[in-house]
Image (cartoon, rainbow, N blue to C red):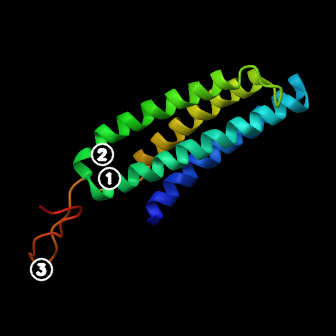
Amino acid sequence: MPSKDVRILLQAAVPTAAVGAIGAVVSGVVAGGKGAVGALVATLVVILFMGVGLYVLQRVAASLPHLFQAMGLMLYTTQLLVLFVFVAVFKDTTLFHPKAFAITLVAATLAWIGAQARAQLKAKILYVEPESSKGDKPEKTGHSS
């Protein structure tokens, strides 16, 4: 994974983990130990899902840049739907407090999306390939036909 991708991943994961830690403390105070566990599980689920999604999206951008926007929209929609499925599946669990899980899941997801958007805006990623100083044609990336 290139360093700019790792930087974006960290800039999204750290605020999400902070929101999850706050959620765990608040849930622990309000709902006890099961609330804290629910908040921690939700935070881990968000970081895992969104992190894998970011990795997949960066791979698609490198190999199939013409599919990047469509893949991004499909990926985020799928991630949000799967997260809602997680909430529905665990709504009656006794392993942790389901409301703490759901609230922290939503808060951590919003934190990830906001932090990733901010990181992407600050990354200054070129959207065109600059010409080399020798006048050579720029290298093509992706698959050639």
Q: CA distance from mark 3 to mark 1?
A: 27 Å
Q: Position of residue 141 (x, y in %)?
A: 23, 64
What's the mark number on residue 84? none
Find disc 2 in the rendering and name its residue.
68
Mark 3 and mark 2 lie on one chain; the one further toward the N terminus is: 2
Query: Real-space Cα distance between discs 2 and 1?
Result: 5 Å
User: Is the C terminus in the top left, top right, bottom left or bottom right quadrant?
Assistant: bottom left
Do callouts 2 and 1 mark residues in contact (Cβ within 8 Å)?
A: yes
State the image quarter where residue 21 is shown: top right
**Of the residues tagged 3 and 1, which is closer to the observer?**
1
Mark 1 residue element: helix
Residue denoted by label 3: 134
Please name whichever residue, 58 or 133, is drawn nearer the observer in this view of the structure: 58
Depth check, front residue: 8 or 81: 81
Secondary structure, mark 3, is loop
At label 2, the amino acid type is Phe
Foreground residue, 103 or 96? Answer: 96
Of the residues under marks 3 and 1, which one precedes in the sequence?
1
- What is the C-alpha distance between the residues marked 3 and 2? 30 Å
Q: With 128 as the anchor, is 135 left or right in this view?
A: left
* 85 relative position to 65: left or right: right
